[in-house]
């Protein structure tokens, strides 16, 4: 048996979530399975055509072979960093330059770097943690700490809304920020819930972070100004105590593996050094495509005019389907404000969401049980075992097939045959 280090033991283990994700990824063996579990973005025909045409033009003008045949620097492609900084400065008025931006191989690796640069045991032996001010939160953070127990989370308050909807809010009254907190982190829009914390909540978190002399990390994988999968008012905000993480994935380019970190120069310099050690340089194809899109002024235009409206229409269609099969008394829905998921709450469900997941899987429908999204809270809160996350991206016919089975299973739970 190979002897593994502590790092090896933590990262090589087949965690519950890795097994679940594999399950989702492989698809289930039932023919005609309905996969509502994963996080792949949609293939929007207009975007697919746009990317094909862009790659054709980049082949012709030599920028594609330039990207493939050369290493970029460890901070990422210089020309792209400059163009993005200029664009954000011009369009949003942010006081930034290329020195405030670093690229990574997907934003997933950006979070691994950030959480472990900031959290963990310090030289003087103090253990510092990353605080999620509102849970549920992105499942992909959960196992990313080099040390155990790197994360703490705060339960939300729940606002009940008309039409069987609800919305989570940051519970500031119970948000404790002790000396052991190294950073605050929140996804906006949130995966899994589709929540968008309000401008007011962001302002309050910014103020708290500043007061405690710790950074506020905002995961903007779905947000504004790109890819723009947001259906509510949300101001894109940045200051030099904010670490804003963005990604090209949800534009429709997850295979490009391009993450973008916008932060103060000191942190960008740290990320640049980590990039050098771990990957020499981030991959160049995504940044080369983004540069071309910036030159054509297409990055934000397509986000606003094509991507946002596509997902908005899909989510409304999916809610209509859900309501045809599941009344409000049986299923509450988190207000869909962004991202590519719907978060369903089966209040007072007599079985756990894990059991519901198993029953659905047997019938060829995959959704993710909600308790995985409450790092550090799942054992202490019933609510965590009453929710499911579904991806609303598949074609409506497939969604309808899945929802019909979901409704049947819910009825079976309440009225066993
Ligand atoms: N953050 C959130 C909230 C996500 O949902 C995802 C992917 O689904 C990521 C980060 C990581 O995305 P990527 O590594 O493709 O940029």
Image (cartoon, rainbow, N blue to C red):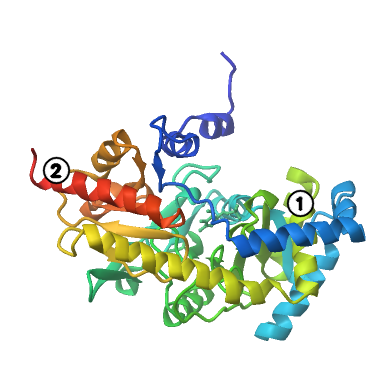
Residue nearest the observer in this picture, 45 or 294:
45
Q: Is residue 306 visible?
A: yes
Residue 93 sits above or below residue 195 on the image: below
Distance of label 2 from label 1 (alpha carbons): 50 Å
Tell me, yes or no, if residue 350 can be seen here: no
The residue carrying mark 1 is: 282
Closer-to-camera residue (403/136): 403
Residue at 33% x, 48% y is 402
| Residue located at (34% from left, 37% from top) | 364
Instruction: Say which residue appears at 65% left-offset and 55% top-offset.
Output: 253
Nearer-N-terminus badge (2/1): 1
Does residue 16 lie above or below 251 as drawn? above
Which residue is pictured at 62% across the width and 57% down the height?
A: 249
Residue farthest along the front direction in this orientation: 397
The image shows residue 266 at horizontal and vertical percentages of 72, 66
Q: Which residue is mark 2?
A: 412
The one nearer the camera, 387 or 319, is 319
Where does the N terminus fall, quadrant-wise? top right
333 lies left or right of 128: left
Q: Nearer the viewer, mark 2 or mark 1?
A: 2
Q: Position of residue 280 (x, y in %)?
A: 80, 46
Query: Relative to residue 167, is residue 300 drawn left or right?
Result: right
**Ligand 1 quadrant in view:** bottom right
On the image, the x and y values in percent for residue 312 come to 45, 70
Question: Tag 2: Cα neighbours inside 10 Å, few (<14), some, or many (≥20)?
Answer: few
Q: Quadrant of residue 258?
A: bottom right
Q: In terms of depth relative to the viewer, which is nearer, 172 or 285? A: 285
Question: Residue lying farthest top?
Answer: 1
């Amino acid at each position: 048996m190979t002897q593994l280090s502590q790092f090896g033991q933590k990262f090589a283990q087949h965690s519950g979530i890795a097994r679940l994700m594999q399950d989702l990824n492989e698809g289930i063996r039932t023919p005609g399975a309905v996969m509502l579990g994963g996080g792949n973005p949609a293939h929007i025909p207009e975007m697919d055509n746009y990317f094909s045409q862009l790659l054709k033009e980049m082949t012709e003008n030599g920028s594609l072979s330039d990207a493939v045949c050369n290493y970029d620097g460890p901070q990422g492609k210089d020309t792209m960093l400059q163009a993005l900084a200029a664009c954000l400065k011009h369009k949003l008025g942010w006081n930034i330059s290329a020195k405030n931006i670093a690229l990574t191989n997907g934003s997933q690796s950006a979070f691994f770097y950030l959480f472990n640069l900031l959290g963990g045991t310090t030289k003087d032996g103090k253990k510092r943690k990353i605080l999620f001010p509102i849970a549920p939160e992105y499942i992909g953070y959960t196992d990313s700490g080099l040390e155990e127990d790197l994360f703490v989370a705060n339960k939300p308050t729940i606002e009940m809304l008309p039409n069987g909807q609800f919305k989570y809010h940051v519970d500031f009254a119970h948000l404790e920020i002790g000396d052991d907190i190294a950073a605050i982190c929140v996804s906006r829009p949130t995966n899994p819930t589709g929540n968008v914390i309000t401008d007011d909540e962001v302002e309050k978190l910014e103020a708290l972070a500043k007061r405690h002399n710790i950074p506020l990390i905002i995961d903007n994988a779905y947000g504004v100004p790109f890819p723009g999968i947001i259906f509510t008012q949300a101001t894109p905000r940045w200051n030099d105590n904010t670490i804003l993480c963005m990604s090209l994935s949800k534009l429709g380019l997850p295979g490009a593996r391009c993450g973008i970190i916008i932060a103060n120069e000191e942190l960008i310099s740290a990320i640049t050094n980590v990039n050098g050690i771990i990957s020499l340089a981030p991959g160049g194809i995504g940044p080369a495509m983004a540069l071309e899109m910036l030159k054509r002024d297409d990055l934000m235009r397509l986000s606003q005019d094509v991507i946002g409206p596509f997902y908005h229409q899909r989510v409304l269609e999916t809610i209509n389907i859900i309501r045809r099969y599941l009344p409000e008394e049986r299923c509450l829905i988190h207000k869909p404000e962004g991202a590519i998921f719907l978060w369903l709450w089966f209040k007072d469900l007599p079985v756990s969401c894990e059991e519901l997941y198993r029953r659905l899987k047997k019938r060829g429908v995959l959704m993710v049980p909600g308790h995985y999204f409450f790092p550090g809270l799942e054992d202490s809160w019933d609510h965590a075992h009453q929710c499911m996350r579904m991806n609303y991206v598949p074609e409506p016919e497939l969604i309808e097939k899945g929802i019909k089975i979901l409704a049947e299973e819910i009825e079976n739970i309440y009225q066993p045959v």
